Image (spheres, rainbow, N blue to C red):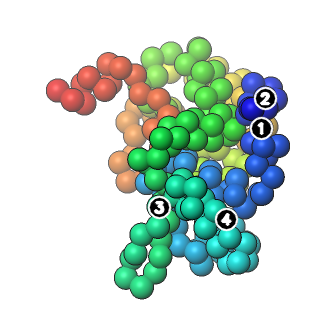
Amino acid sequence: MVLRFNKLIVLNKLITSKTRLRLLIKFFISQANRGYLNGLASEFNESTNSIRKELNHLSEAGYLEKYKDDNKVGYKANTAHPLFDVLQKVVYAHLGLEELVGRVLERMGPVQQILLTGDYAKGLDSGTIDVVLVGKQLNTEYIEALEEKVEGIIERKVNFYLTSKPNPTQLTVLLYENESTKNKATL
């Protein structure tokens, strides 16, 4: 059963453990995200015991994989799990990213890519979503109205940045890529 509020999936009604929800966001916003017990505890400002308990639950269910890194145990999303894609879509919907992409594509012009940056690209639910819109001749007049409209819908602060080329050194999560852009990259 999925609960909806303003077209968003309200995971905090389904998953009552805030720690578990934060871990799901951390690992399923980007499959590249990794974490260690102590690092996650300080990142989330929670006790190692509560983090360990939730990591164990998610690992036992098969959603996370444990791996050894020298003398530390690390965790990452299990991309081979049959529900990986579903969980990733649910996390995106919970954060309002699907709604955000839809609104951008509505009237922004020829968007080549939509990239998530900042805290959310790292898997941190900080409340401020930073989005880079890549394209030429984007509708810059629409962007300010779009920020307010999207913020009202997804209940998070949104910052849009416009560019003609993405910064290759910046940590990003690809939310959308125009088919013609994909085809040019593979030629």
- Residue furthest to the front in view is 60
Identify the residue at image location x=76%, y=49%. 15
Identify the residue at image location x=63%, y=41%. 91
Q: Earlier in the sequence, mark 1 or mark 4?
A: 1
Disc number lying in front (2 or 3): 3
Q: What secondary structure is found at the residue carrying circle 4?
A: helix
State the residue position of label 1.
Answer: 10
110, above or below 94, in the image:
above
Give the left or right position of residue 140, taking residue 6 as reference.
Answer: left
Tell me, yes or no, whether the two marked residues, 4 and 2, touch with CB atoms within 8 Å. Answer: no
Mark on residue 65?
3
State the residue position of label 4.
Answer: 54
Q: Find the distance from the CA under tag 2 to the CA under tag 1.
A: 6 Å
Q: Find the distance from the CA under tag 1 to the CA under tag 3.
A: 26 Å
* Mark 4 residue type: Glu
Give the left or right position of residue 186, taking residue 48 as reference.
Answer: left
State the residue position of label 2.
Answer: 4
Q: What secondary structure is found at the residue carrying circle 1?
A: loop
72, above or below 89, in the image:
below
Mark 2 crowdedness (10 Å alpha carbons): few <14, some 14-19, many ≥20: few
Q: Find the distance from the CA under tag 1 to the CA under tag 4.
A: 20 Å
- Residue furthest to the left in view is 187
Mark on residue 29?
none
